[in-house]
Image (tube, grey):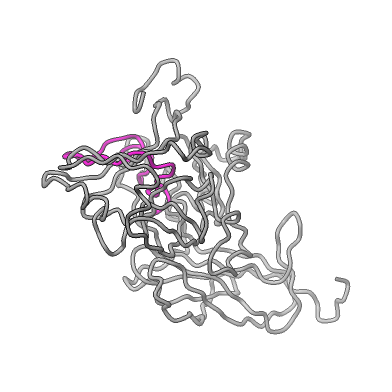
């Protein structure tokens, strides 16, 4: 029943909506937040995010077949000269590559929007960077021979569910030009950080699309179909679009907007997560990335954005689709402060200081705000 509406299902699958002015996080959103998780911001200290700390978003269920990889096959069909059906051994016979890629959920920052779109309530932690190993998609497509009239490649995952009354397999597409590109090179990945894919990250196969938001990185990949007309599945034409109203057709969500995040300095209060530091020089550090162009500058503020100071940015290290480290020093004085970091990429695109609102809560790269309390100079109570 892929892409089919059902009257019975529609009664339990609500349309998208915006939270009321005084509406808090619902039990349903809390349940989503409990099964999906963000990366603890202190994990920004790792060049590679450990698999258990990397953000996770699972639209439906982790397929049971993810634990039985022996029978798994990947089909490549549609507008191709020679359709392929590959088991994992056959896939591994192709030359393998490893790419370091920063992946971010398109909804990262959604819960900070006002009014708030009702969905997975991300703050700013829906990100991670890993080294993904697999076969370049362009190699597989060259092997089967893409027909000249093919315009898109449609990727089908094994996860199945219902969303806004539509029962479906999770599916997304890429234009053929992107699917066959060598820069960035899309992967059919079977490894993460030197080991096999964990179940929550798409075991045994997933797509990795450098520079694109996470919705494009189809997990539990079981089918690739070349089509001669644009794909109009739910996740492509309805869900992941920048819209200002319910009847706005919107524009597609694609590449990652620039963002810088800071490792919260000092130590935290348990409930409020307010950071506590002592007076004097405080080392500030974080990561910055963009899927649109290389990050060229990071600025830091410690006065709620009234002034900005350029941070030091690590030189390029050859990992063009992964985050870069930045560093700065702040002289803390007793009292309360709000710290922020702001990334700018080579295209001149910089993070906004006012929220870029849309109905789905996508691409909200509003600058991070980190509340910090600096103790008095003579306070030795902790």
- Percent position (x, y) of residue 276? 74, 69
Tell whether position 91 is magenta.
no
Vertical position of residue 373 compared to residue 105: above or below: below
Camera-side residue of 62 and 240: 62
Stretch of the chain drawn in magenta:
213-242
Looking at the image, the residue that sits furthest to the right is 381
Q: Residue at x 50, y 50 (%)?
A: 197
Instruction: Please tell me whether residue 152 is drawn above or below residue 328 in the rendered image.
Output: above
- The residue nearer to you, when weighing 242 against 157, is 157
Asked whether 255 or 49 is in front, the reply is 49
Q: Which residue occupies the foreground of this view, 95 or 149?
A: 95
Residue 290 percent coordinates (x, y):
40, 65
At 64% from the left and 67% from the top, the residue drawn is 264
Residue 56 as seen in the image, left or right of residue 239: right
Say whether residue 360 is left or right of residue 183: right
Q: Is residue 121 above or below residue 159?
A: below
Q: Is residue 325 left or right of residue 79?
A: right
Residue ranking furthest to the left: 148
User: Based on the displayed image, in which of its 4 quarters is residue 3 positioned?
Assistant: top left
Give x and y (percent) for residue 381.
88, 72
Of the 4 image quadrants, the one containing the N terminus is top left
Please tell me which residue is depicted at 58% across the width and 68% down the height of the picture. 46
- Asked if residue 215 lies in the magenta stretch, the reply is yes
Which corner quadrant of the image does residue 184 belong to? Answer: bottom left
């Amino acid at each position: 029943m892929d892409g089919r509406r059902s009257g019975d299902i529609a009664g339990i699958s609500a349309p998208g909506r915006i939270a009321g002015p005084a509406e808090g996080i619902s039990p349903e959103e809390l349940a989503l937040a409990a099964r999906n998780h963000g990366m603890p911001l202190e994990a920004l200290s790792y060049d590679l995010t450990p698999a258990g700390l990397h953000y996770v978003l699972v639209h439906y269920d982790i397929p049971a077949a993810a634990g039985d990889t022996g029978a798994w096959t990947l089909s490549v069909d549609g507008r191709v000269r020679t359709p392929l059906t590959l088991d994992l051994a056959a896939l591994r016979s192709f030359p393998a590559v490893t790419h370091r890629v920063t992946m971010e959920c398109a909804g990262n920052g959604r819960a900070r929007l006002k009014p708030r779109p009702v969905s997975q309530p991300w703050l700013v932690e829906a990100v991670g960077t890993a080294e993904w190993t697999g076969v370049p998609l362009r190699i597989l497509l060259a092997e089967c021979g893409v027909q000249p009239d093919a315009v898109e490649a449609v990727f089908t995952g094994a996860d199945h569910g219902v969303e806004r009354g539509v029962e479906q397999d999770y599916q997304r597409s890429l234009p053929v030009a992107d699917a066959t590109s060598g820069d960035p090179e899309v992967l059919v990945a079977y490894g993460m950080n030197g080991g096999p894919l964990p179940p929550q990250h798409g075991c045994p196969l997933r797509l990795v699309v450098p520079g694109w938001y996470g919705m494009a990185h189809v997990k539990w990949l079981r089918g690739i179909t070349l089509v001669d007309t644009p794909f109009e599945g739910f996740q492509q034409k309805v869900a992941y679009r920048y819209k200002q109203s319910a009847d706005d057709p919107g524009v597609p969500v694609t590449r990652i907007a620039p963002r810088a995040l800071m490792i919260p300095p000092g130590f935290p209060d348990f409930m409020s997560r307010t950071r506590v530091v002592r007076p004097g020089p405080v080392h500030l550090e974080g990561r910055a990335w963009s899927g649109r162009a290389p990050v060229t500058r990071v600025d830091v503020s410690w006065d709620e954005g009234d002034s900005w100071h350029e941070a030091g940015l690590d030189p390029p290290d050859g990992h063009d689709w992964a985050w870069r480290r930045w560093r700065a020093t702040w002289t803390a004085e007793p009292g309360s402060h709000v710290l922020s970091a702001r990334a700018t990429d080579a295209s001149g695109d910089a993070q906004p200081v006012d929220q870029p609102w849309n109905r789905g809560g996508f691409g909200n790269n509003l600058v991070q705000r980190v509340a910090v309390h600096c103790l008095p100079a003579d306070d030795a109570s902790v």
